[in-house]
């Protein structure tokens, strides 16, 4: 299998150069364009210092909650799922929070919870799919030194396939009429992340490898 990783410390700029070299070599010698699944967008790496926390974002079903603990185990870090903390502190499920107080109240609770948790070190943090819609949350996660925001990109069809049957616990998924427009609205916001990886075709372990590869 083609490996894009070298076991060296790299910053975002070096990684971009490395990926473009590999693509060029593949085009010249193999006569093929590297498949999209092997390419990653690496825009910046948390002010070029080694990340102390990795924050996973992406639409529902992108694997944030599944990959987070695997990634944390590989790094010897802790894992926290923001939605779990919100539910534990509220004493009710997210679906109940939406039903009782509405989406706006949930978003404010989500913003405050992330602001508190995102100060931790040696931490993998999984966000809920809508967290990056909040401008303050985006600004915090994109600029805080040592924070690397990683977008796990999936097609809407992947979300629908993976999340089928979980509408009762995911109010945003249940809101079918607005799902496609939400997905389209969020996509450019997710893509502002330091690293964006298309994970539709990856197994959880492959996705973790790709994240580790991207951080060098
Ligand atoms: C939401 C996604 C959910 C959860 C809440 C809202 C969203 O998290 O935070 O139901 O707005 O996309 P997952 O992305 O983990 O399903």
Image (cartoon, rainbow, N blue to C red):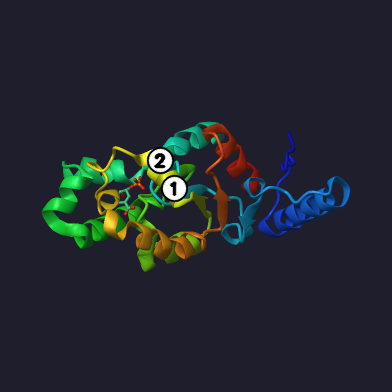
73 left or right of 98 in image: right
Q: Any atom of ligand 1 within 8 Å of the CB at mark 2? A: no
In the orientation shown, which residue stands out farthest toward the right? 29
Local secondary structure at mark 1: helix
Residue 20 position within the rendered picture, expressed as x and y whole percent measured from the top left: 76, 56
**Residue in the picture at 17% in, 58% down:** 102
> Circle 1 is placed at which residue position?
157
**Mark 1 near mark 2, Cβ–Cβ under 8 Å?**
yes
Q: Is residue 72 visible?
A: yes
85 left or right of 141 in image: left
**Residue in the picture at 75% in, 51% down:** 33
Q: How many marks?
A: 2
- Label drawn at residue 161: 2
**Residue in the picture at 17% in, 50% down:** 97
Q: Is residue 76 visible?
A: no
Residue 177 position within the rendered picture, expressed as x and y whole percent measured from the top left: 28, 58
Local secondary structure at mark 2: helix
Q: CA distance from mark 1 to mark 2?
A: 6 Å
Q: Nearer the viewer, residue 113 or 3?
A: 3
**Residue in the picture at 13% in, 56% down:** 101
Residue 179 position within the rendered picture, expressed as x and y whole percent measured from the top left: 33, 56
Q: Is residue 49 above or below residue 168?
A: below
Residue 121 position within the rendered picture, expressed as x and y whole percent measured from the top left: 47, 46
């Amino acid at each position: 299998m083609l490996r894009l990783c070298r076991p060296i410390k790299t910053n975002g700029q070096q990684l971009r150069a490395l990926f473009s070299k590999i693509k060029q070599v593949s085009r010249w010698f193999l006569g093929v364009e590297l498949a999209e699944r092997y390419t990653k967008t690496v825009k910046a790496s948390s002010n070029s210092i080694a990340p102390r926390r990795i924050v996973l974002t992406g639409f529902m079903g992108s694997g944030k909650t599944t990959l987070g603990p695997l990634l944390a185990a590989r790094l010897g870090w802790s894992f926290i799922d923001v939605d779990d903390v919100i539910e534990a502190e509220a004493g009710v499920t997210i679906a109940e929070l939406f039903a009782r107080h509405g989406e706006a109240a949930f978003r404010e609770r989500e913003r405050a919870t992330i602001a508190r948790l995102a100060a931790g070190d040696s931490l993998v943090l999984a966000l809920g799919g809508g967290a990056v819609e909040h401008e303050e949350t985006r600004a915090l996660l994109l600029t805080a030194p040592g924070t690397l925001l990683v977008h796990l990109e999936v097609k809407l069809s992947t979300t629908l396939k993976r999340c089928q049957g979980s509408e009762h616990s995911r109010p945003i998924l249940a809101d079918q009429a607005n799902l496609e427009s939400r997905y389209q609205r969020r996509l450019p916001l997710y893509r502002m992340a330091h690293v964006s990886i298309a994970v539709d075709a990856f197994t959880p372990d492959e996705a973790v490898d790709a994240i580790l590869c991207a951080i060098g």
